[in-house]
Image (cartoon, rainbow, N blue to C red):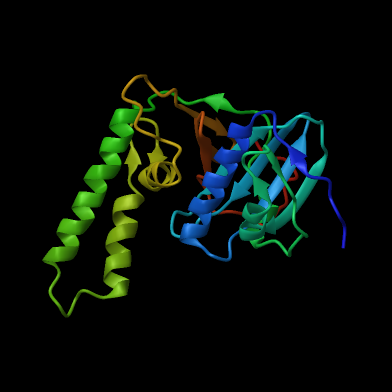
Amino acid sequence: MTVLAPLHFADAREAAGLAAFLRRLLHYDRAAAVRLQAGAGALAVFGRPPSFEVLAIRTARLVDAVDLDVTVSAGELLEGVEESAGKAVVPDAVTGPPWAGVLPPRSGWEPVAGVPSVADLRGAVAAAVAEFRTRDEALGEERRTRAERDRIGREIWSRTLAPSGLPLRAVHAAQSLGFLPDLPDRELPVALLAAGPWLRLRTPYGSVALRSVPMSLSVTPGGPR
């Protein structure tokens, strides 16, 4: 067993933000794994909540310039987060799922025009959820199967927001993971970026990334900071 030194965050709020992110991932998958990459005083935590088909990324500032690249249990990492002390104990490595070997690139990101405001993004998700419920309720008892409901969900969440080309499922994931909070006192900055086949919706609270073409088996050692 390799014992790693605890990660010390630049601010206790960074630890609290990481803990909140891990709790949301575990809500969707109790056996979730996350890949950690640290370097140059920053930590990037990657997860893949099932059903959304996106990668979720939470970053945090560190006190020390730690070099780290490991895949761990999200639940064990959460247990090692000490929010008040602003630190986290990194658990033993686990065998990573396939997605952990195919991460977005660290650099080469370019802005994409046409990203809606946060209010419009949240409104699009609310409208999609309402449509799903209406269509689900309209199904006859014999048609209300898991397969039919999944078909309706795929149809709705695969739609893109013109003219950005961002799939609705990415926006839904961002909102569900707490990356698009409702801040009535100020406007939340949000950006849409592209790098090769990747799209990335970024806010100060985290990012979601997805490929516009089917994921290959090639391994990219990088990852956005």
Q: Position of residue 220 (x, y in %)?
A: 72, 46
Would you identify the image quadrant in which residue 126 lies?
top left
Would you identify the image quadrant in which residue 96 lies?
bottom right
Looking at the figure, which quarter contains the C terminus?
top right
The reply to whether residue 115 is in sight is yes
The reply to whether residue 225 is in sight is no
Nearer to me, 192 or 173? 173
User: In the figure, 61 relative to 23: above or below?
Assistant: above
Q: Is residue 166 left or right of residue 4?
A: left
Q: Is residue 15 left or right of residue 189?
A: right
Nearer to me, 203 or 148? 203
Nearer to me, 125 or 27? 27
Q: Is residue 7 left or right of residue 128?
A: right
- Taking the spot 75% from the left edge, 41% from the top edge, the residue there is 7
View extreme (top): residue: 186
- Taking the spot 64% from the left edge, 34% from the top edge, the residue there is 60
Looking at the figure, which quarter contains the N terminus?
bottom right
View extreme (right): residue: 2
Q: Position of residue 155 (x, y in %)?
A: 30, 56
Q: Position of residue 171 (x, y in %)?
A: 39, 41
- Taking the spot 47% from the left edge, 58% from the top edge, the residue there is 27
View extreme (bottom): residue: 142
- Taking the spot 63% from the left edge, 42% from the top edge, the residue there is 104
